[in-house]
Image (cartoon, grey):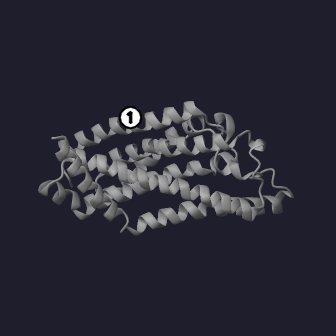
Amino acid sequence: MKRDFIKRLKSMLKVDFMRMFTMPAVYIMFGVSLALPVLILVMTSFVGGEATGETAATFTNVWQAIGSAGGAMSMDLTSMCNINLLYFLVAIFVCLFVGEDFRSGYVKNLFTVRAQKTDYVLSKTIVLFVAATGMFLLYFVGAMIGGGIAGLSFDLAEVGASAGGIVACMISKIFFALVFVSIALTLSTVGKAKLWLSILGSLAAGMLLFTMIPMMTPLNAGAFNVVLCVFGGPLFAAGLGAVSNVILNKTGLV
């Protein structure tokens, strides 16, 4: 029984990875993730300096593009235009990926021929988590590039962080993405081919969770934040995955 499940899951993962990496949307999202921090850091520093004569009102340190220490949520530019924006991009991509399965009729053919709905949900969660991880890593690279171009400080002490804290912060943010992946996946099973409904629902849910992100994944994150996200993210995904499975079993596939 266990061997059959693993065999089915491997087969489903292979198909999903192949489908994802043949979609133009995934490369668009990767490109946006890389370019977004470059544009934000360069443009805000330039415009801020031109408008006020200083950059204090915008980004002064490259690590501000990754987050803030202490988990405080404010309404300034550095808090609203940092890596946390990627959670919304992740949710949109999940909706695009899953919605295409329903729009094209792939899901109906898949369940008729071989796959079980549990395999489908688990495979989608894993594949989309991999895509989200790629987006966050590309954003980090883009932030380093953008900070260098804008001439921003890379001093960790200025923002109350350390090298270990940055690593813990990124790990926490990546695993916290599982929350957004699972929410968008569940809402996509509700909206099915109605892409607009899935996206609106996912963005609305994301807005409700947005203020939690700095608290869960601060720039000076520690072992507690990592453990909370590494274990909490998969548990949350498992719970919503079960909900997605029930939805697929109880509703039509169109």
Residue at the far front: name it.
Answer: 3
**Residue 178 in sight:** yes
List the residue tagged with mark 1.
235
Drawn side of residue 136 relative to residue 247, left or right? right
State the residue at coordinates (37%, 59%): 96
Return the x and y of residue 28 as percentages of the image width and height. Answer: 48, 66
Q: Quick check: 134 above or below 246?
A: below
- Count of all numbered marks drawn on residues in the image: 1
Q: Amino acid at mark 1?
A: Leu
Task: Tell me the SS state at disc 1.
Answer: helix
Given residues 198 and 177, the one toward you in this image is: 177
- x then y, percent, for residue 150: 75, 62
Between 190 and 11, the one nearer to me in the picture = 11
- Quadrant position of the N terminus in the picture: top left
Q: Is residue 14 above or below residue 168?
A: below
Which quarter of the rendering shows the C terminus?
bottom left
Whether residue 122 sits left or right of residue 8 in the image: it is right
> Which residue occupies 43% across, 43% down?
178
- What is the residue that sits farthest to the left in this orientation? 113
Picture quadrant where residue 2 is located: top left
Residue positioned 35% across, 58% down in the render: 97
* Relative horizontal placement of residue 207, taking residue 65 as reference (left or right): left
Q: Position of residue 52 (x, y in %)?
A: 84, 57
Residue 111 vs residue 162: left or right?
A: left
Q: Residue at x 78, y 53 (%)?
A: 153
**Closer to the camera in the image, 134 or 104:** 134
Q: Residue furthest right?
A: 53
Does residue 251 appear in the picture of this structure? Answer: no
Question: Within 10 Å of the Cα at label 1, are there few (<14), some (14-19), or many (20+) other Cα atoms?
Answer: some
The quarter holding residue 34 reads: bottom right
Percent coordinates x, y for residue 154 in the rendering: 75, 52
Identify whether 231 is placed above or below 132: above
